[in-house]
Image: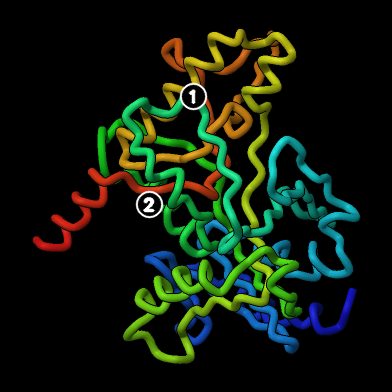
Amino acid sequence: MTSFLAMTIHALMPYLATPFHALPESIRARAFGVNYVKFTDPRGGELYITRHGWPMARHLAPEAWYSQGQYFKKGRRLTGGTGTVYRFHVSSPGEPRAEFVVKFSRFAEHVPLFMPSTLPDDLPGYLADSAKFNSPFEEFALIEDLRRGAFGPPRLRIRTKRPLAIYCTPGRSPLWQLGRTEGRFSEYDLALQRDQAGRRAEAQVHLDIERQYIMLYGWVSGDNAEDLELSGVLTPEEVEALTRRVNRELHEKGFRILDNKPKHLILRRLRDGGVMRRGGDLVYVQVDFELLQRTDDYMQFLQEMDGI
């Protein structure tokens, strides 16, 4: 454990017994409508914890999972995708085991987009050409919006993994190593600047083009639909129908995911070998949001709400 990272948990200690809503203004931050508490280590690393993450804040401190590369030494890299994702757990004496996902943000990188055939036939072609990975703060904001479900059928709920925290590492890397360009980055930077306009300078959230951003999510237990098909638990027809249904339900709630695929849908196995269903329908949790977007219908709804 390195001393500079150990100071993060030291900074957290005075606040751990305080409910999220009662934490002091001096450590609060807000980006795209999502509230965080922010802690900075002496080398400049920044930890932003959401209300979902606050009950397990001690485990989200960088020394618990990031120090000396613990996320890849002790964690398990998840395969089957193009991003860098690890499953990690922390066990402390006398406390429940905390298990979460460590995911490196790919914002401002080129999108190697594959358009699955399960997307709606009327999806505009320009979306593929203009696709971009969400920044970590945009991604968390979109997920929280999706979880609230203010648009579309009130009874329809899209289950997702919980966004816990964002960690901006203290070290800097050359752009070629990160896969970013200044041209792509400027769009993200401008969007965040607009969002932060009017906030006190010391409370503003910034993006740094030369630093890594790591998102921490709650782990969702279960098996993905692709593996369930390969193991014979689900038929190819069931998986295709599920994927189409998920995209339809996302659209009804005002969202789309450009590369949604069975690998991103988690289902829970039952003791009898089957899969959990409700009313005959498979129960799923959506777990990938790099390319989550609001639909035009939802954007229009939001504009109309702002005009009221």
Residue that mark 1 sits on: 117
**Secondary structure beneath label 2:** helix
Query: Residue 56: horizontal and vertical position, in percent?
Result: 65, 60
Kind of residue at badge 1: Ser
**Secondary structure beneath label 1:** loop
Residue that mark 2 sits on: 145
The one of 35 and 12 positioned closer to us in this rendering:
35
Labels in figure, total: 2
For the view shown, which residue lies furthest in the bottom direction? 201
Query: Residue 68: horizontal and vertical position, in percent?
Result: 89, 68
The one of 289 and 38 positioned closer to us in this rendering:
289
Residue at x 46%, y 85% (from the top left corner): 203
Q: In this view, does 302 lie above or below 15?
A: above
Indicate left or right for 178 with 164 as reference. right
Is tag 2's residue or tag 1's residue first in the polypeptide sequence? Answer: 1
Indicate left or right for 156 with 20 as reference. left
The one of 176 and 283 positioned closer to us in this rendering:
176
Kind of residue at badge 2: Asp
Report if the CB atoms under discs 2 and 1 are less than 8 Å apart: no
The one of 98 and 257 positioned closer to us in this rendering:
257
Other residues around mark 2 within 10 Å, as few (<14) / some (14–19) / many (≥20): some
Residue at x 48%, y 91% (from the top left corner): 202
